[in-house]
Amino acid sequence: MFLGRVMGHATSTVKHPSMKGWKLLLVMALRADEKTIEGDPILVVDSIGAGKGQTVVITSDGIGARELLGHKNTPVRWSVLGIRDP
């Protein structure tokens, strides 16, 4: 679990059935200073309405993602847990 900055959203015309109807975000991980971006973009499922430029708490909990999407074979690994207050 760590903080990331939402860089934008992703659109897919073909995706796994478990992802139908879910908002997908591109998130960049933040270092401890909460300003420096680190690593490659991560595709994240969003159920709480985060927007571009917001800082979010994300998790790679696969079990949580499966429960969130209601599908035991989903390929989704990352999901948004919360939006950080400004």
Image: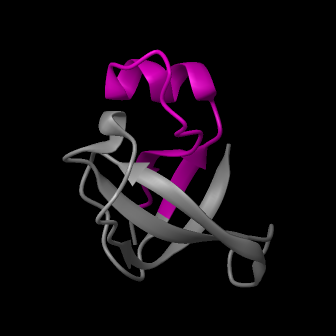
The spot of residue 32 in percent (x, y) is: 80, 67
Write down the quadrant of residue 11 in the picture: bottom left
Structure colour scheme: one colour
Q: Residue at x 52, y 40 (%)?
A: 76
Q: Position of residue 14 (x, y in %)?
A: 34, 58
In the image, residue 10 sits, relative to residue 46, either above or below, namely below
Of all residues, the one furthest to the front in this rendering is 14
Q: How many marks?
A: 0
Rendering coords of residue 75 (x, y %)? 55, 37
| Quadrant occupied by the C terminus | bottom left
Q: Is residue 30 magenta?
A: no
What is the quadrant of the N terminus in the image? top right
Tell me the residue at 26%/48% (across/down). Answer: 22
The span shown in magenta is 56-84
Name the image quarter holding residue 53: bottom left
In this view, the residue in front, 80 or 24, is: 24
